[in-house]
Image: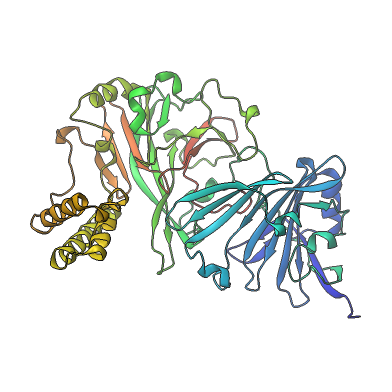
Amino acid sequence: MPSPLTHASVYCEGWDPETARPVGILSPDTARARDASGDQYAVLVREAGGDPLVLLEIAWSHEHCGVWLFDADGERRTHHRYARREDGELALTHSRRWPDPSAEAADAAPDLVMTTIVVMSADWAGYHHDYLSGGRTTVNRRPDEDLVAVMTRPAPEFGRWEGLLALHPRLSDTTVRLGDADAAPDSAPALAPWCPPGPLAPFGVDELFQPGGHHRDAWWRTPSTVEVHDIGTVALPTGRILVCDPSGLGSVTEQQALAVPLPPGEHPVRLSVLRSSDPDREFALVAGVRIDVADLVGTPVESWEMALRPGEDFQVLGEGQFFGVMVDGGSGVVSLGDVACLPHLQELFASSDHDHNLLIGYTEEERARFADQDRSLREAARAFLDAPGRSTAQAFAATVGDSMTGEPYTRRGVHVLLRLAHAIVHTEDPGLPASADPGERATDTSPWSRSLCEPVSGANLVTFPAGYGGDPCPVWLGRAVDGRVAALVVDTRVIDRPGEV
């Protein structure tokens, strides 16, 4: 019988994926005391050579135990989340997995970037698949056998992590001997890089506005860097702020303003952009927008809290839930402004010659994308006209859009495609639609933001893309140490926060 393998346990605050190392090293006695009191801590189990294998994130006051599994490259590609039941068993509630690009299965779904599994019962689970294109598919079905095998585990006593280590494929059939690593505790306290389950917490809000910060984006987990841009000011005559999708301004009321106002006045606004540092996947996504109260610029925010509207109750929120701004996938943008803007904007949008697109405009990235689409349309249309046939018709129809993919299979459809292809090839690009009244158009304040002035009250509406374009965004209120409101942040959640599922 082979001798048991010896692995080292490192107690810490958590794991930093950017530096690929544990942060906030704790002594075993400190970790034991936290375990007894229910306070959160983490355990990193390493091989004898130092390579990470399993990270445990424990917070018994929340009945929580998270298990991260590392691959051979030191990347965390599997995250199981367990809840401790009254009988002392750990029950799996969520599992999140990122495909390994080197695995054979990756060839079957090359666009898959993440699978999230929500366990509803022992016989039923929801499988959510997120794709490179930004799409998501969901299917509820019986859980796979590999998931059934890990649905329950005994809640471990402190230091007895072997049952959870067996979740790692390399340790499932191996006898493991654990010992504490020879790691000196950090002298200075460190912020834990994860949060136990509960309503969405304001985790990493300050990091959104630290230029040069290195992160990964939430969908593709591409290494990226934070840029921060000044985009002017927002004028708040009353201080009562509306945060909404501008496509719904026609039905918004003053009662939907945030319950806690900002001081009236003109306040600076900054925009955070997460820019890819991977040349094979280039993007620049708005990660958040921040209003700083003018009189408190430079004052540190002591605490962040969820900004609520009248009638919203934080206590009713379930795990990972939040109140925020819903974003329509068609517009993909968020607007910030004083309620004083509302009468003028609603009157403006009541005209058939205006709509919320005058607030959105077109970013540089969008203009480049539209130009690429025009070139593709012309190339596919020319190929179809030069050699009419089923294959060229299908290629052209697919370039036009999903609604045209059935046209190559009927005589009428082929005729429509020929007429469309002829028009595309023999006419100039008409350009992008503009507002009927240029004087009412919003002005660019950056490649990602616009501002529309309201001439009556002197207020203005600041508009920006909502991250990936269609996801709801939480809004955070920042307070100074004396309790005064110092900042407001709309968080588009494009930065990967590994503690969330």
Residue at the bottom extreme of this rendering: 2
Q: Position of residue 295 (x, y in %)?
A: 44, 33
320 vs 285, left or right, is right
200 vs 414, left or right, is right
353 vs 426, left or right, is right
Q: Position of residue 115 (x, y in %)?
A: 58, 55
* Nearer to the camera, 480 or 349: 349
Q: Residue at x 56, y 24 (%)?
A: 312
356 vs 2, left or right, is left
Q: Position of residue 374 (x, y in %)?
A: 20, 57
Figure disc tally: 0
* Nearer to the camera, 62 or 352: 352
Q: Position of residue 137 (x, y in %)?
A: 50, 49
Q: Quadrant of the N terminus?
A: bottom right
* Nearer to the camera, 369 or 296: 369
Q: Residue at x 42, y 25 (%)?
A: 239
